[in-house]
Amino acid sequence: MQQHTLADEIIQTGVGLHSGVTTQVRIQPAETGSGRYFVRVDLPDTPIIPAQVAAVNQTLLSTQLGKGEAYVRTVEHLLAALAAMGVDNARIEIDGSEVPLLDGSAKEWTDAIAQAGLVSQTLTEDKMTLVIDQPIWVRQGDAFACALPAPETRFTYGIDFDLPAIGNQWHSWSSTANKGNPYASFAAEIAPARTFGLLHQIEQLQHSGLIKGGSLDNALVCGPEGWVNPPLRFANEPVRHKILDLVGDLSLLGSFPCAHFLAYKASHNLHIQLAQRILDVGVGS
């Protein structure tokens, strides 16, 4: 069974969305079968935090992983880029508690991964993969996330907002769309989609101690009159960003099962609930 890691290290520095603190991330090649994992190099004993569903300890407006007292927040964009670009094994050293938001998307991560390149790795023994042989659902009110048996791995998302500039949007993306270069479609169609916020919620979030690092340079903001900081990179950039979040959260499974992942008005919490249900219900092969 083939896996891949980076051919060279990647270094990025930036501000965390919620903490407002500048951190540096150094992503290094990792051994076959080690998976993707974070290392808090700023803490005593440099604790390792695995990028796994079991490590999730908070999902408020981002996904946070933790082990013991150590944690790392807002991991979803970086993990989406690594997983969708084919990086199975990576050591992610970080000198703070939150992954930099950069421009609000995963574009800088995918650009850096493409520049670093990949090297193949061979597993000496087969690794169990999850098979979706029945529909798996989680829901909360009218919001839901599910995994359906399918011949290809596909991510479909729907959102619905009262603001006219967003409204009802749907988008679908297949990770197998480009057989010659399976990573190109993610880098072009999903990775550039930036995080977005609603103008009327910003003050409340700031008073709650959140989005301290948010700005018009790293997040789209929408109000009743339209977008505060256009132009958009895609007409439906908000829903594409939700696919980015879903890919990042489901990457905590280790690898993506062959399935159609479908979500509507979901959240990081529902994404992680779905991932846990897949682990509980999915059949190993």
Image: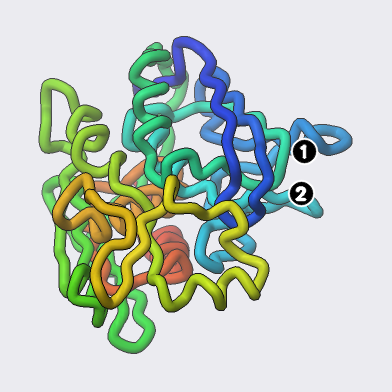
Placement of the C terminus among the 4 image quadrants? top left
Of 73 and 100, which appears nearest the observer? Answer: 100
Asked if the residues shown at circle 2 and circle 1 are in contact, with their CB atoms under 8 angstroms apart, the answer is yes
Residue at 42% from the left image edge and 14% from the top image edge: 116
Residue 163 image-quadrant placement:
bottom left
User: Which residue is the site of mark 1?
Assistant: 47
Residue 268 image-quadrant placement:
bottom left
Residue at 32% from the left image edge and 72% from the top image edge: 223
Residue 219, percent from left and from top: 41, 53
Report the side of 8 relative to 236 (left or right). right
Report the side of 156 relative to 65 (left or right). left
Q: Element at badge 2?
A: strand
Amino acid type at circle 2 is Ala
Residue 272, percent from left and from top: 46, 63
Vertical arrangement, residue 48 with respect to residue 262, above or below: above
Q: Element at badge 1?
A: loop
Amino acid type at circle 1 is Pro
Mark 1 closeness class: few <14, some 14–19, many ≥20 residues within 10 Å: some
Of 80 and 134, which appears nearest the observer? Answer: 80
Residue at 40% from the left image edge and 71% from the top image edge: 199
Spatial CA span between label 2 and label 1? 7 Å
Report the side of 76 relative to 263 (left or right). right
Vertical arrangement, residue 60 with respect to residue 109, above or below: below
Mark 2 closeness class: few <14, some 14–19, many ≥20 residues within 10 Å: some
Vertical arrangement, residue 149 with respect to residue 39, above or below: below
Q: Give the color scheme: rainbow, by chain, secondary structure or one colour.
A: rainbow
User: Which residue is the site of mark 2?
Assistant: 70
Residue 35, percent from left and from top: 52, 33
Q: Is residue 185 visible?
A: yes
Placement of the N terminus among the 4 image quadrants? top left
Of 130 and 171, which appears nearest the observer? Answer: 171
